Image: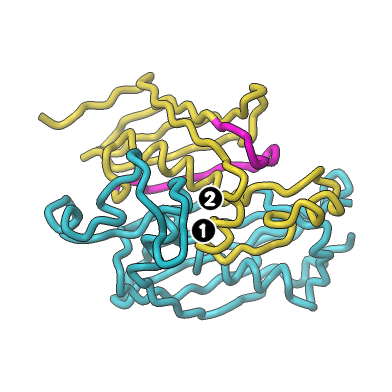
Amino acid sequence: MPRTYQPGDTFTHVRECDRYRPIYYAGASGDYNPIHIDPEAGTAAGLNGNILQGLCTLGWVVEAIAGFVEDPGRVRRVKARFSRPVRPEDTITFQGRVTSVQDGRLTAEVSATNQRGEDVLKGAVVEAFIG
Amino acid sequence: MALDKQFIGREYGPYRYTLGEEKLREFTLAVGGAKPGAGTPGEPPAHVSPLLYDAQAAQAGPHGGLIAFPSFAVVFAIRPFSAAIADPALNINMQMLVHGEQDLEFLDVMRPGDVMTTTGRVADLYERARMGFVVVTSESRNQHGALVVKGTWSAIIRG
């Protein structure tokens, strides 16, 4: 029986940014900006070390909704503001809450906080087909 | 920081990109948390959908074959944005630039072998609180001419 979804439903996804994740993501995505792969370059840019590519964090938001609707092919939209850097050794908790279900399409708000409870994204919204 | 509004509407592309199966697998596993090594993208973590890396499982699945991780689109659809922020005409100080906001719409799934053509334009340039904002929109169509990915890319130029 197909799963049903309702406003107020929640989902959670947890990801750790291991030490080399920015380098692995650079290799896969082509984003080799030195602030992501070189701690000295990050520090020189005033970031106190290297930071994860924001688009990798956005990918984790996609994973969160893809897992919830049980098929990455159903994901229709992801939107977010990058409000705070994710650093190596950070653990990010994504918490989603469904805000509407209409015409076979689900919309959810997603928060993303690090292990200190600080938001790393703002205004994150995802949409998926559930028909 | 002076952003010249006359460049709103400036266009970039078209850029062509062919989706390769191994590249898709590499990306989904790099985002997913696998540890890549020489000759392998690494072992898939349990949370990663087999529809993204296991050809046999994907064939029996809802899409009849492997599909791309949705935000794999950033790998090619970013091109007009990268071109705009590096455009000498816009004269942006890259050292002071951060990626501020991202919006991606996926109108269909992407599969290995798809050939995507991306175009983009500067949608807005403005200043606020002594910072500069650059907004680029992109559209990516597949080999059948269908619009598959729409992107809105926003950069902030500090100070």
Q: Is A79 positioned to the left or the right of A19 in the image?
A: left
Residue at image position (46%, 65%) is: B38
Farthest residue to the top: give it.
A8
What residue span does the magenta drawing correspond to? A74-92
Q: Could you tell me if the residues under marks 1 and 2 are in contact, i.e. CB atoms within 8 Å?
A: yes
Q: Name the residue under label 2.
A: B103
Q: Residue A54, how many percent across, how many down?
A: 61, 48
Question: Quarter of the image holding residue B152?
Answer: bottom right
In the rendered image of this protein, does residue B37 appear above or below residue A48?
below
User: Disc 1 marks which residue?
Assistant: B151
- Residue occupying image coordinates x 39% and y 40%: A127
* Lateral position of residue B140 relative to residue B65, left or right: right
Q: Is residue A7 magenta?
A: no
Marks 1 and 2 sit apart, C-alpha to C-alpha, by 6 Å
Left or right relative to B48: residue A79: right
Which color is chain B depicted in?
cyan
Q: Residue B121 carries which label?
A: none
Mark toward the start of the polypeptide (1 vs 2): 2
**Vertically, is B150 above or below B79?**
above
- Name the residue: 57% across, 32% down: A91
Looking at the picture, which amino acid does disc 2 mark?
A: Asp
Chain of the residue under the numbered disc 1 shown in the image: B
Position of B30 with respect to A113 (left or right) is left
State the SS at label 2. strand
Q: The numbered mark 2 sits on a residue in which chain?
A: B
The chain letter corresponding to yellow is A
- Can marks 1 and 2 be said to lie on one chain? yes
